[in-house]
Amino acid sequence: MAKALTEEQAEARLAWLAGEIARHNRLYHDQDAPEISDADYDALVRENNALEAAWPALVRTDSPAKLVGAPATASHLAKVAHARAMLSLDNAFSDEEVAEFVTRVRRFLNLAAEEPVVLTAEPKIDGLSCSLRYEEGRLVRALTRGDGAVGEDVTANVRTIGDVPDTLNGKAPAVFEVRGEVYMAKADFAALNEALAGERVFANPRNAAAGSLRQKDAEITRTRPLRFLAHGWGEVSEEPGGTQYDVMKAIEAWGLPVSDRLVRCETAEAALAHYSSIEAVRADLPFDIDGVVYKVDRLDWQKRLGQVSRSPRWAIAHKFPAERAQTTLQAIDIQVGRTGKLTPVARLEPVTVGGVVVSNATLHNADEIARLGVRPGDRVVVQRAGDVIPQIVENLTRDEERPAFVYPTHCPVCGSEAVREEGEVDIRCTGGLICAVQRFERLRHFVSRGALDIEGLGEKTIDEFLALGWIKEPADIFRLAQHRDELLTREGWKEVSVDKLLAAIETKRAPDAARLLFGLGIRHVGIVTARDLLRRYATLPAIRALAEEIIALRKASEAAIGETETRFRNRLDKAIAEHIGVEQVGAAVGHALADFFHEPHNVAAWDDLLAQVVPPPFVVETRASPVSGKTVVFTGKLETMSRDEAKAQAEALGAKVAGSVSKATDLVIAGTDAGSKLKKASELGIEVTDEAGWAAIVAAAG
Ligand code: IVH
């Protein structure tokens, strides 16, 4: 199936999958806020792997198959390298796939037919893995998995977990890293969420465990009902047994909890029977599990089997099928996200799916509604795969006569037109500046560092002024002085702070045109594109005129007789890109500008803003500097400026900013947590500096 794509399509799909999988990794591991179910995530990974197998030449250097979890980023916790990598597990979804696993093991070890492959089998706990390092029997360090190679130091937090002993019973080896899951029992999770009501509520026990373990303050972790269950080990000075089972029993004897459902199975059939027995009691177990893990028992075999990229050849997770139930679809509501994305949500007659009452399910997008053919009134099958948002997987009454669901053509929040862009599945509200849900984000973006950079106008203040009705759109910020007296009467505001804010606003009356254009948050118009456009068009009115020309161009163009939709679109896009006439600025930007100016309220907000501020014509001042004409790459997290600001600085110094490191790169500026790009730079022997080094270059250029 993977081969049915052209090479170009496969390449594009792999690029998309790499980005998407990385995003979901971050959401899941880093932010404890998954957007998709485990089953959907697994499907993405499997599609990626199938494509990579079909097109080995297209395997990317940042292939998701090479990563385990998300890099340990964006965190207050110290990063520490694992003494031995923490691996992930390959998945099996059927008895056949388990049989294939055993066959692979046999083939790899070249075993005689009569030689049994003894396996251990135990529940797969839905928690987060943690490595506990014991030296001379004392707990010295606890790390999360992180990206598998580098984890986060959670020693202080883990010390608060009752299940984890500070010292091991009996005679333990000099070094022994116990690995297992930190998790939260279902009842404890429910009680915690109740206690936290009003504050942050966790979506499921796994997120609650992750959020609780990764606290800055271990005293908060202490108040959270975390538990630990060992399932393996990392670096060890000696193994207290020759089999997986015996080592696990030794770990248990040292005082660490090990599953009471860990068994040794002489045959694959016995392992599958154990799987069925665990599945039968799944809902009654005190904690969430999402499958059964089988491991080759003999450790000498484990060593010979080794690993393939992210997972050992000697273990496999046999996942439970998603839990399902039938119910009635009562309504389809459309929610508007912060970026204007419209998401249909199914309102369901409440039904219990795997012990959890479900009354909402995601329908993803208009395509999904069409694929399922769902309409309010239909009987549907709802699936809850492990955690996160339940989904509708089947419409049981598709054949019944009912009018099809009509997807709104306008935003339900602000009434602006909702459009679907070529090649995209999402439908977006074009309301931009006037749409309430988007208003906050847009204003925040407008005043942010990379845009107008108005000091003192943070999220809290924007929220306050929005609630008071003082600001709705950017121009209102420049009228805030009218509210000075009233603001002085409000809690938290003093003459000094009020005047400081108003003065900061006044300094932005003649803002940089590119920053202003970028600040409007028009899709696809980042700071670099804004500069590219202004270098050619110089003023904002000229940009508006350009947008209007594109609107006219779109209106005037028609498909030729016999021309396919795709061909027509390609022809139009080419004309638009040519009309813009700026290398690196494509039709997507043209369409985005046209969509923005197509909405009268955006035009009104724009006019209003330009009555308040007067950006001088855009002049690119490039200063002579050591980086003039050089290609630079920024990577990692910058502390004192946004990435966009850094890019703008580099451009002002006459440098070209590239997104990836190659032989053509002259300088890499590595912020904190820089990863693969930094590695590549050192491999290629490219000069690397840090943020302070970059600041010095900028300062020296004057
Ligand atoms: S063994 C080298 N056993 O599942 C293999 N993992 O999806 C290491 N997990 O990263 C894992 N229960 O965090 C193993 N009984 C179990 C497990 C288990 C839960 C987690 C573990 C692993 C993830 C892989």
Image (cartoon, rainbow, N blue to C red):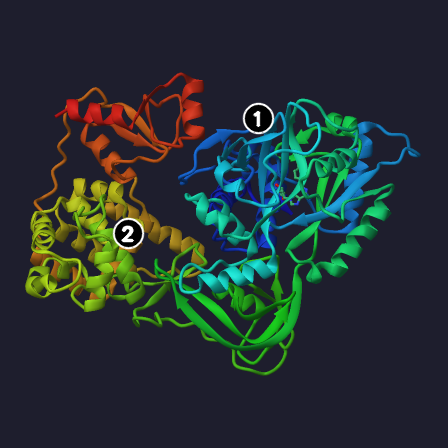
Separation of residues labelled 1 and 2 (CA atoms): 51 Å
User: Which residue is more in the foreground, 559 or 118?
Assistant: 118
**Label 2, on which residue?**
590
- What SS does tag 1 mark? loop
Residue occupying image coordinates x 39% and y 56%: 568
Q: Where 626 falls versus 486 (above or below)?
A: above
**Label 1, on which residue?**
83
Mark 2 surroundings within 10 Å by alpha-carbon count, few (fewer than 14), some (14 through 19), many (20 or more):
many
| Image x and y of residue 308, in percent | 66, 32
Q: Amino acid at mark 1?
A: Ala
Q: Is residue 556 visible?
A: no
Residue occupying image coordinates x 48% and y 69%: 345
- What SS does tag 2 mark? helix
Q: Is residue 455 visible?
A: yes
> Which label number is shown at residue 256?
none
- In the image, farthest residue toward the top: 685
Residue occupying image coordinates x 82% and y 47%: 271
Q: Quadrant of the C terminus?
A: top left
Which label sits in the foreground, 1 or 2?
A: 1
- Side of 3 where 146 appears, left or right: left
User: Which residue is more in the foreground, 582 or 359?
Assistant: 359
Q: Which mark sits nearer the N-terminus, 1 or 2?
A: 1
Give the quarter the ligand 1 occupies. Answer: top right
